[in-house]
Amino acid sequence: MAVTIECVLDCQNHLGEGPVWDVEEGRLYWLDCTGPRFGLDAVWRLDPKTGKVESWALPKDIGAMALRESGGMVAAMADGFYFIDIKGDKLELDLIQEVDADIERTRLNDGKVDRRGRFFAGGMDDLEELKNCGLYRLDPDLSVTKVEDGLMCTNGPCWSPDDKTFYIADTFIEEFWAYDYDIDTGNLSNKRVHASTKEDEGVADGSTVDAEGYMWNAQLISGDLVRYAPDGSIDMRIGMPVKNITSVMFGGDNLDEIYVTSMARVKHPAVHDMFAVQAKPQFQAGNLFKVTGLGIKGLPEPRFGG
């Protein structure tokens, strides 16, 4: 079967991010992280079988979300960890713990859940300049632990299928790092450079790992969907229809479809000049895309245990 790339929803997200496939109900969740700044809905849900689309507003930025074993969601919001419950056409927020709320211009950004139900989320400097953010672990008992610091823009946390390696990128440092991961404790050790985007047109944004242990990353700026081998070498590049793709997630009944989010934002708060100057968004920027026909499967996304 030929590889096909299609736009599945014209949602025009300001900063589309964080797709999560619900394997139990066969629906895709994703975010418009900075949509709340402009009165746009922040949490989105698509049922591919029926075509039904739902979206909800939030009062502040959201960086990442995951589904909970007990129902509802856990989220990394601008100022900390929250539970989110859907109440009809509204979302109900319940603060778990603030994180770095006293550090100016930082917010929690990307995050994911490990296969023991722990939620990891890291911060970013809104101007993409200072290494002033941490990576945090929210355990099922709701305790919060800082597991790394000195980050500028956390993206792409994910794990190898055997749970022995944790991957993360710092977008504007232009590196992926790998750590030894202790699945029993949730601790990280032996940090090393896994891959780099310093010679690429794009920079790393959201990631996921497939069933073969290869990491997929959405490259911001270049519009490339990149598959990295376990040794950090590039196995495959797929050019997407828009330049600013932001994250990637396997979905579908067989977890063999790849959903890709993107952003329509053209005015960037960053102090660097890596983004192209645009008077208006690229055609289809901010929309949701799907790649099919690769014959590669993903892994079920775990739920938060708390």
Image (tube, rainbow, N blue to C red):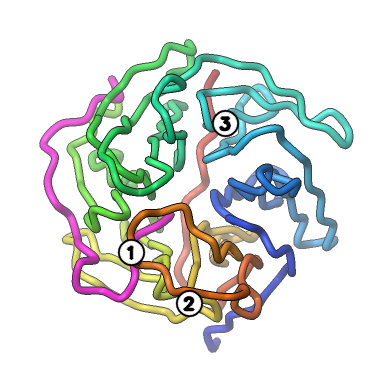
Q: Disc 3 to disc 1, how far (Cα)?
A: 24 Å
* The C terminus lies in quadrant: top right
Q: Residue at x 36, y 26 (%)?
A: 136
Identify the magenta region. Answer: 184-206
Residue type at the position of mark 2: Leu
Sequence order check, earlier mark of 3 and 2: 3
Determine whether, in the image, residue 98 is placed left or right of residue 237: right
Residue type at the position of mark 3: Ala
Q: Disc 2 to disc 1, how far (Cα)?
A: 23 Å
Query: Could you tell me residue 97's position as x and y percent?
Result: 51, 14
Sequence order check, earlier mark of 2 and 1: 1
Q: Identify the disc placed on residue 95.
A: none
Q: Residue at x 59, y 61 (%)?
A: 254
Query: Could you tell me residue 46's position as x and y percent?
Result: 75, 55
Determine whether, in the image, residue 262 is placed left or right of residue 114: right
Q: Which residue is mark 3?
A: 75
Q: Which residue is mark 2?
A: 294
Determine whether, in the image, residue 213 is placed left or right of residue 73: left
* The N terminus lies in quadrant: bottom right
Query: Could you tell me residue 205's position as x and y percent?
Result: 40, 57
Quarter assignment of residue 191: top left
Q: Identify the disc placed on residue 203.
A: 1
Give the crowd class for mark 2: few <14, some 14-19, many >=20 residues within 10 Å: few
Give the crowd class for mark 1: few <14, some 14-19, many >=20 residues within 10 Å: many
Is residue 31 something one can see in this rendering?
A: no
Foreground disc of the pair 3, 1: 1
Please tell me whether mark 1 sits on a helix, a strand or a loop: strand
Depicted 230 relative to depicted 102: above or below: below
Please tell me whether mark 3 sits on a helix, a strand or a loop: strand
Residue type at the position of mark 1: Val
Quarter assignment of residue 111: top left
Is residue 127 something one can see in this rendering?
A: yes
